[in-house]
Amino acid sequence: MRLVIPSALILILCAAATPAGAVGFDLGIAIGAQLNGDISHLDLNTDDGFSLGLELMFEIPIIKLGVGYEYGFPRDTDGAVSDIQYHLVYGIGRIHLGPVYFAVRAGYADVSAKVPDYKGSNAAISWGAGFGVRISKFKLEAMYNDFDIEVDQAGGSMPYTNYTARVIYSF
């Protein structure tokens, strides 16, 4: 009996730590190219940039749920805004239909940029949607991303959108 209760507690904690009884996990590193960035509030386009990220996915049949971190390297715009970069922490879900999948992610970003005459918290709610294909240990993914950056001026936010093409390697 002394071993039954601790063993049961360990099993319950393990089950609680893996969402919906996941059968395993997938750790991946993501390298992305960010294209067609747009700051619509200021009518500016950003230069193409790169991102580097890490994802931990819990494998459930057909669906994978996980968390991730992404760093967007600094990029400039065709105007006065420069050095746009971000740190993004997000939750992600992928629905697999064979090797093809659809992905949705939502998270919180700390965005920094040199923006004349704007003050803000640099906090941004972010969401993205896209699709991809899995080939062996690699995933090729295309995603639309939207960052809603909080600012102190009237309107309260400054939208920043881009498209991302990513390659994810799973360990």
Image (cartoon, rainbow, N blue to C red):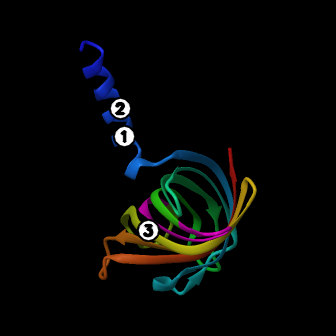
The residue under the point 68% across, 67% down is 99
Residue that badge 2 annotates:
11
Is 154 included in the stretch rendered in magenta?
no
Q: CA distance from mark 1 to mark 2?
A: 6 Å
For label 3, the crowd category at 10 Å Cα-Cα, with few meaning under 14, some 14 to 19 and many 20 or more, is many
Residue that badge 3 annotates:
126
Q: Is residue 147 above or below residue 45?
A: above
Q: Amino acid at mark 2?
A: Leu
Q: Is residue 16 above or below residue 68?
A: above
Q: CA distance from mark 3 to mark 2?
A: 35 Å
Q: Position of residue 164 (x, y in %)?
A: 64, 71
For label 2, the crowd category at 10 Å Cα-Cα, with few meaning under 14, some 14 to 19 and many 20 or more, is few
The magenta stretch is 95-111
- Under circle 3, the secondary element is strand
Q: Nearer the viewer, residue 52 or 111?
A: 52
Q: Which quadrant would the N terminus be assigned to in this image?
A: top left
Q: Which mark is residue 64?
A: none
Q: Quadrant of residue 77?
A: bottom right
Q: Amino acid at mark 1?
A: Ala
Q: Position of residue 43 (x, y in %)?
A: 53, 87
Furthest residue in direction right, as rendered: 136
Q: Are marks 3 and 2 in contact (CB under 8 Å)?
A: no
Q: Position of residue 163 (x, y in %)?
A: 62, 76
